[in-house]
Image (cartoon, grey):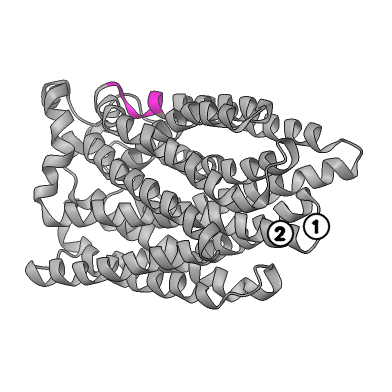
Amino acid sequence: MSDLDRLYRLGPIHLAPSVTRMQAATLLFGAFFSIGLMTFIAVGQTYILNAHLGIPTDVQGTISGDLVFWTEIITLALFIPAGILVDRVGRRLIFAIGFLLLAVTYVLYPMAGSIDDLYLYRIIYALGVVTVATALSTVMADYPAERSRGKLVATVGVLSGLGIVVINQFFGGLPKTLTADGLDGIQAGYVTHYIVAGIAVVVAVLVWLGLQKGTPIHHEERLSVRDLFVSGFAQARNPRILLAYLAAFIARGDQSVNAVFLILWGTTAGLAVGMDSAEAVKNGTLIFVLAQVAALVWAPIMGPFMDRMDRVTGLALSMALAAVGNLAVIWMADPTPGSAWLFCVLLGIGQISVYLASQSLVGQEAPLNKRGSVMGAFNVAGAIGILIITAIGGRLFDGVAPYAPFVLVGAVNVLLLALCVVVRLSGPAKPAAALEKV
């Protein structure tokens, strides 16, 4: 057996041929920081709106939704080119550049003197999200053997969730700690954001050093840029890939609703009862963190379970769990950790289940030489989900009720559950074990 065909394991996870333990460990390291650094924008932005810019709370839902909408307009245009770059120049370069772009975002964000500045900085943030998300999802599809795909995706989900909890919990509460130590609110915002930016730079360097060089296909197997450009959406002729794209629509929308509106709900509720900005943001962050802790605990249960069933069946189950979690929020009257914990647990379970199931399905179905482009299209679908759901959700949050964005997501979960049943009944099952080639 040549080195290129050598098979490794990282704990219980069987790796694809030629993927080493160090490379797989670097993927897991990058996964820990990737989503956490991307979602910190919601915590940091809420603090900037209140402590730096003094924006009235009754319009923050619309502003937050519009900022996310603007970000997703940009990502829509860039996910396919990013997927092509991942297929042509390699995963690790794009991954590292993405973290550097996130670092630049967090250096600039506390400098904002107006909402218009935040829109400008969101362009850089969008570039960071596109490159990190595309590279992460592509490497996550590259590295596992098929029989361990659910386990690796679940491990990535656990570490991503842990990163969200650690980064948002610690840095969400850091301004309060800094102000208690004598800094004013604006200085605390600067220090917090600069520390987060420094972490992003360190992660960029380590990802560059640790991931596999190049691409996992031979030069002669590479498709042209034109073929890569159209191949992502052309693969939607496969009903299972189309279903994965639709699942990405709601998975990313669900993540965004939780990150933006759960934090905002807890923050505005805290301000309404007399908390200062730092304390109110901490309250909003805590209920968001509760949801992520639930996801963290649930992922290692759900991932191996999905390796034992057809991926579409797993997605159907996930949609059912997400529908329950999102629709139950109608009865969450008090968005504080002590009162809202059960609703947050249900939200976290539903969110991580859809994420795991959609990533497992698209990773199984995407052709190797078109994988970056398929992941680009997958992420475009997710960006459309964020764009539509947050734009509508922000207005529902301000104009109807804080729970309204979650009900919107729950309704889409129900629709996609029905579609999963249709796709599952229309074709044979594909259990992971039957697809294993090694």
Q: Is residue 160 left or right of residue 311?
A: right
For disc 1, the neighbor class at 10 Å (few under 14, some 14 to 19, many from 20) is some
Q: Name which residue lies at 28% across and 37% down.
A: 376
Q: Main secondary structure of the magenta part?
A: helix
Please report contact status of discs 2 and 1: CB closer than 8 Å, yes or no.
Answer: yes
Q: Find disc 2 in the rendering and name its residue.
A: 283
Q: Is residue 227 left or right of residue 141?
A: left
- Above/below status of 309 relative to 386: below
Q: CA distance from mark 2 to mark 1?
A: 9 Å
Q: Residue 156 has which mark?
A: none
- Above/below status of 214 relative to 177: above
Amino acid marked by disc 2: Asn
Q: Quadrant of the N terminus?
A: top left
Q: Is residue 372 visible?
A: yes
Q: Name which residue lies at 15% across and 63% down.
A: 430
Looking at the rendered structure, the secondary structure element under dot 1 is: loop
- Above/below status of 224 relative to 189: above
Amino acid marked by disc 1: Met
Viewer-nearest residue: 246 or 211: 246
What span is in magenta?
A: 89-94
Q: Name which residue lies at 11% across and 28% down.
A: 227
Viewer-nearest residue: 301 or 118: 118
Q: Residue 275 has which mark?
A: 1
